[in-house]
Structure formats: C-alpha cells, structure tokens
Image: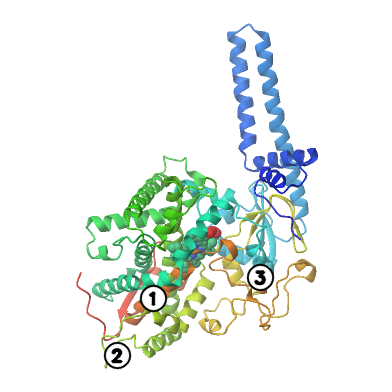
C-alpha cells in the first residue's frame, strides 16, 4: 500500500542490505541522490560546500600573494570550483524537487501565500496557529496545503486519514522540527526522538510506571497536595483574584515530582512562605518550565543575545538543566523500588550497547517527562475551571455528582469524607467535562504528526511527494463543523454516550477513491468492528505508538484536582481577564496552548467549607 519510509536514505540502503535485498549500483546512486537532497533540505551539506568553496577561494587568494607556486594555486582553484559545482548541483536538484513537489500538490486546495518567498509563514509565527488552521479547514475542507519557505505542509483533518496517519508505522515524527527542542531538553528523548530502537527501549522500559497500580499508589499524594492547595485558596479569600493557571501548574509539578522521582517539590506547600528558599526554587523551576515551553520558538532568534527576553530564555534553560541534574542525582540515591518511574528508567538498557543508559541519555528523558507533563496537565485543569465557570448548568451537575458521593459539605455533614481512588470511576459527568474541555482546548493544539515522507508516499488516493510535512492538527480535528455537530458549544453531555471519540455516520467526507486501501470505517454503530478498525475524531493525547505515555496519570490527577477544588469552591472569572473574549485573546500556542499571563479567578467557598489545614 504505502511505500515504507525510512527517515534517512542511507538507513534505507543499510536496511536493504540487512534484509538481503539487492543493493545494485543504481540503487546506491539513487540513495546518494536522495541523501544529497535530504541534506539540502536540511541545509547542512549545501552550506558545507558553499563555505568550503569560500574558504578555499580565500586561501587561494592569499596563497597567490604569498607564494609563487602556481601549481598549488591551481589545485586550490580546482578544489574551489569542485565545491561550487557540488553546491550548485545540490541547489539545482533541490529547486527541481521543489517544483516537482509543488506540481504534485497543485490539485490540493489551500491559501495563497502572501509572500512568494516565505509562503504562509504567518501560521508558524502567529499566537494561535491552531485556530488559524481550524479557520483554514472550514474554508478549504478536510485536506488542504500551504507552504512555509520551501516546506510544503499538507493538513489532514479527515478522521479516517488522520487516524491512519497517526497509527501507521510508515509516518514518523519529523526530527527536523522536534530537534529544535533537543538543546533545551539536553538531547533527543522519548518525546523528540525518532521511532527507532532507542525510543522503543525507553518507552517499553518506562511504560509499566504508568500502570493503574502505580497511579493508584500516587493518589494519596495527589489528594494531599490538592487539599493543601484548597486550604491556601480558602485562606486568600474570595476577593483575591488567584492565578489558577499558576496554581494548577504547581499542583501538576508536585504530582509529577512525587510520581516520577519520589521527590517533594514543595510547589504547593511553599505558597505559604512566599519569601522562602523553597518558593524561590519552585518559582525558578516554574519559570524555567514555562520558559522552555513559551520560549521554545526562541530557536528562531537564539543568537540575538542583545535582547533581554532571549537572554532570559537562556538563563531559564540553564536553570532547567540544573534541576534535571539534581533530579538525576536524587533518583540515583533512592532505594530501588521496582516499578517506579525512576527505578525503571535507571534499569533501561541502551539497545546499541546493551548497557544501562548513561547520564547524558537519562537527563533528556527526565527533562522530557517534566516538560511533557506539567504544562499539558496544568493548562487543561485551568481551562476546565474556566469552562465550568462559564456554564452554571454543568457546574450544578458536577455538584450533584459530588453530593451523591458524599464529597460535598452539607449542613448535616459539614466535613465531607475524603476523596478515594474508587471515586474516580463514579464521576462520569466530571470526566465528560474534562473530555469536552480537551476537545475544545487540546493543549497540543497543532498536533503531533508533523511527519515527513522521505520518498513519495501513497496515502489512500493521495500521492504525497517526498519531503512533504503532514500535519494532523488536534484542535482543528476536534473543532471543525464537518467532524462535529455544534463544535463551538461546550456540551459535556455528548461524552455520556459511548463512542463519541469515533467518527460517526456512513458518510465519508471525501470521494471514495481517497480512502483506497485504508481499512478504517466511520460506522460507529457496528459493534463487531473492533475499535482499532474505527476512525477517530478525537486525539487530545495523540494516537498510536507515539501517543502520550502519561495519559492515565494526567486523567486521574485532573479528576482528583477538579473534584477536590469544585467540592470546595465555585469559580468566577476575574474582571481583569476581560470576559470570555479576553480569555480567547489570551490563548497562546507555544507547543502547548495556555492562557498568556495566567487565568485569574475568584474562588468562592461553598458553604460550609473546611477549616484551613495548619502548615
Ligand atoms: C492533559 C494532559 C496531557 C496531554 C493533553 C498530553 C498530550 C500529549 C500528546 C498530544 C503527545 C504527543 C506529542 C507529540 O508527539 O508531539 C504527548 C506525548 C507525551 N506525553 Fe503527554 N499529555 C499530557 C500529560 C502528560 C503527563 C502527565 C506526562 C508524564 C508525566 C506526559 C508524558 C508524555 C511523554 C513522555 C510523551 C512522549 C511520548 C512518546 O513520544 O513516546 N504527558 N502527550
């Protein structure tokens, strides 16, 4: 069906040798040409030859003045011309390839670039590219294309094709884009690396840490941390406009610190002592995590060290790395506890050497866990509180659910019983609220699948030329009118029906030939078809092999946090947020979508409320 795609053409030749397939001369030439093009697209080889030509030219010029050896000069000249020739060859090949790609994709609809050279660059630099993509999908349909510089991007929001791409092994993450994070995380890691043997070893090694048993074990800590957060909010009183985003990021940091590394991060506890060393550390850590996320786009201007924000970004990355080093030292000092994240990671072996991972390999994995877990969970919790505050009927239903479980203070029972792990499965409406919020505000809004084909690839009836980036933007898939009824409405009730995440109806969005050889269906009424055969239209945690490893932890921690906070408080948006329009305006995508400047809310205690816990 689709041509299996390697990430690098040389690897393809190697694989062919390993599989015992012929590696003829023409195949090798093909590989070399592909390799040159691959490098040209990554600029490396082209720049190498251009710089080499310039260098040799300069040496030749100097040598002319200093030496009378004509032969040396002519050798340098020849080398110089050879470099120019190779660089020109790469450029010509690249231009021809670019034209070919443009022609092959010409039949797809898409916005016209405002500027011929940069293409549709504004989507890469705007504050809300996820919303821009959604608007484009409404205008151009389930498949459209745009170009950023020389990169052609095909955006796929059709559920069948998107599900196929996310599940298929033929499409990998594009390292070119993810590798921009590596310097900040200390190297390639579970999140940013290729789907290769190393990734498989790490993923397989740490997956058991996220088992239901381990999440259950961490539950007591989640409850204690959120109760302390509630006590802090109660002490501040209803008139204070609390930045709920910061508070929930702190809660997420506490959960991940404890879950992953059995380390008390004091993120909530230190709120009581704003001038303490602990709070300063947490603030620095929080800032640096935020910096890593919000300033990830810094790569575009990392060298502008005269700019204070760029310098602040670098300082933050330095702090982040310091934290990771301390966490690794802490992990190594822990008694071995079979099954914990720290223990499993320390026992993971490098598939190349067969030895335990080295410190340089462990650090990026630790950084990635913090990076991937804190902002996603924190911002989701924030948007949940926001949506509930805007929908009193939904809030009333959550309150009724909590009341039924005896988790709300009542006149007869002013001190409700403690939240237990078993309650998590008894909160279907609150779960529906979280799912609906993740539909409308998926933190990874632009989606995971920036996958790149290294060879022409057939995707159903669509031929994707080599080098095309494929995006399956989660926000768009979740919010376009052709995938959902009334997508703009906050309707947790839709999640009370089973199978809501699957594409519904017999109707396919595109002509039948677009789906050739893709054996996924959109008939959600057929229970005989396994879920793996059904097309999805909901991917907050992505899908397939590269889906979120921490989703069970995230969902449990969100449920517990929201149940505890909503049982004690009712939330009202602070005036300074400027109402729903202001919140919409503040939304900012920087790898993760969050409210820029925080989400300020008043926490109004429900009567009668608990006594604040003594710190
Ligand atoms: C509401 C919360 C969360 C959401 C919506 C979320 C969403 C996602 C998504 C969409 C991806 C794929 C991203 C990409 O490949 O570009 C991802 C990957 C990942 N997430 Fe999460 N995540 C959440 C919480 C967490 C937590 C709590 C952890 C760990 C403590 C975590 C750890 C990871 C890791 C390690 C990956 C990379 C997995 C791989 O490629 O093998 N996430 N997450």
How packed is label 1: few (under 14 Cα within 10 Å), some, or many (20 or more)?
A: many
The residue sitting at 30% across, 87% down in the picture is: 409
User: The N terminus lies in which quarter of the figure?
Assistant: bottom right
Asked if the residue under mark 2 is in contact with the one under mark 1, i.e. CB atoms within 8 Å, the reply is no
Q: Is residue 136 above or below residue 567?
A: above
Q: Quadrant of residue 253?
A: bottom left
Mark 1 or 2: the one toward you: 1
User: The C terminus lies in which quarter of the figure?
Assistant: bottom left
> Is label 1 in a helix, a strand or a loop?
helix
Instruction: State the residue in front, 337 or 315.
Output: 337
Residue that extends furthest to the top in the rendered view of this protein: 68
How packed is label 2: few (under 14 Cα within 10 Å), some, or many (20 or more)?
A: some
Q: CA distance from mark 1 to mark 2?
A: 20 Å
Q: Is residue 205 left or right of residue 173?
A: left
Checking the image for residue 239, the label placed there is none
What sort of colour scheme is used for the picture? rainbow
Checking the image for residue 159, the label placed there is 3
The residue sitting at 68% across, 10% down in the picture is: 71
**Label 1 CB less than 8 angstroms from ligand 1:** no
Measuring from the top left, give residue 475's x and y in whole percent: 57, 67
The answer to whether residue 477 is seen in the rendering is: yes
Residue bearing mark 2: 410
**Label 3 CB less than 8 angstroms from ligand 1:** no
Residue bearing mark 1: 560
Q: Is residue 95 above or below residue 243?
A: above
């Amino acid at each position: 069906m689709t041509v299996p795609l390697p990430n690098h053409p040389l690897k393809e030749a190697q694989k062919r040798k390993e599989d015992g397939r012929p590696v003829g001369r023409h195949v090798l030439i093909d590989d070399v040409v592909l390799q040159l093009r691959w490098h040209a697209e990554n600029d490396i080889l082209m720049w190498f030859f251009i710089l080499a030509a310039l260098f040799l030219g300069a040496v030749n010029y100097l040598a002319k003045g200093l030496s009378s050896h004509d032969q040396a000069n002519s050798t340098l000249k020849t080398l110089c011309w050879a470099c120019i020739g190779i660089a020109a060859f790469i450029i010509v090949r690249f231009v021809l390839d670019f034209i070919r790609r443009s022609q092959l994709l010409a039949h797809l609809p898409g916005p016209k670039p405002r500027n011929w050279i940069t293409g549709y660059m504004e989507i890469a630099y705007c504050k809300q590219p996820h919303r821009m993509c959604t608007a484009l999908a409404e205008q151009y349909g389930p498949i459209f294309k745009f170009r950023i510089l020389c990169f052609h991007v095909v955006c796929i929001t059709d559920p069948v094709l998107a599900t196929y791409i996310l599940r298929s092994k033929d499409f990998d993450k594009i390292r070119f884009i993810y590798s921009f994070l590596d310097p900040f995380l200390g190297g390639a890691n579970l999140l940013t690396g290729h789907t290769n043997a190393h990734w498989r070893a790490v993923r397989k090694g740490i997956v058991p840490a996220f088992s239901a048993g381990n999440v259950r074990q961490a539950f007591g800590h989640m409850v204690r941390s959120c109760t302390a957060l509630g006590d802090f909010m109660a002490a501040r009183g209803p008139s204070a406009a609390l930045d709920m985003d910061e508070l929930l990021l702190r809660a997420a940091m506490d959960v991940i610190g404890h879950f992953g590394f059995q380390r008390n991060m004091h993120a909530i506890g230190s709120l009581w002592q704003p001038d303490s060393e602990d709070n300063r550390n947490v603030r620095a850590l929080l800032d640096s995590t935020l910096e890593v996320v919000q300033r990830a786009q810094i790569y575009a201007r990392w060298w502008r060290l005269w700019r204070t924000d760029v310098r602040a970004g670098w300082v933050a990355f330095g702090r982040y790395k310091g934290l990771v080093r301390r966490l690794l030292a802490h992990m190594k000092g822990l008694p071995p506890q079979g099954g914990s994240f720290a223990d499993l990671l320390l026992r993971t072996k490098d598939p190349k050497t067969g030895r335990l991972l080295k410190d340089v390999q462990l650090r990026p994995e630790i950084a990635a866990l913090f990076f991937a877990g804190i902002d996603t969970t924190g911002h989701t919790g924030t948007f949940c509180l926001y949506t509930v505050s805007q929908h009193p009927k939904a809030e009333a239903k959550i309150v009724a659910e909590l009341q039924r479980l005896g988790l709300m203070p009542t006149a007869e029972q002013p001190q409700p019983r403690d939240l237990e792990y078993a309650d998590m499965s008894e909160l279907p409406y609150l779960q529906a609220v979280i799912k609906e919020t993740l539909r409308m505000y998926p933190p990874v809004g632009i989606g995971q699948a920036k996958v790149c084909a290294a060879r022409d690839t057939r995707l159903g009836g669509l031929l994707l030329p080599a080098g095309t980036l494929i995006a399956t933007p989660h926000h768009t898939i979740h919010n376009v009118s052709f995938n959902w009824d009334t997508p703009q409405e906050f309707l947790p009730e839709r999640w009370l029906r089973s199978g809501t995440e699957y594409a519904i109806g017999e109707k396919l969005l595109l002509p039948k030939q677009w789906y050739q050889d893709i054996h996924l269906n959109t008939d959600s009424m057929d229970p005989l078809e396994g879920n793996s055969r059904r097309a999805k239209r909901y991917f907050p945690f992505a899908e397939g092999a590269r889906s979120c490893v921490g989703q069970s932890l995230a969902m449990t921690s969100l449920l517990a946090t929201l149940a505890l906070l909503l049982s004690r408080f009712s939330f009202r948006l602070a005036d300074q947020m400027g109402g729903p329009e202001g919140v919409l305006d503040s939304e900012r995508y920087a790898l993760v979508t969050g409210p820029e400047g925080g989400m300020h809310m008043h926490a109004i205690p429900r009567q009668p409320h608990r006594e604040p816990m003594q710190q």
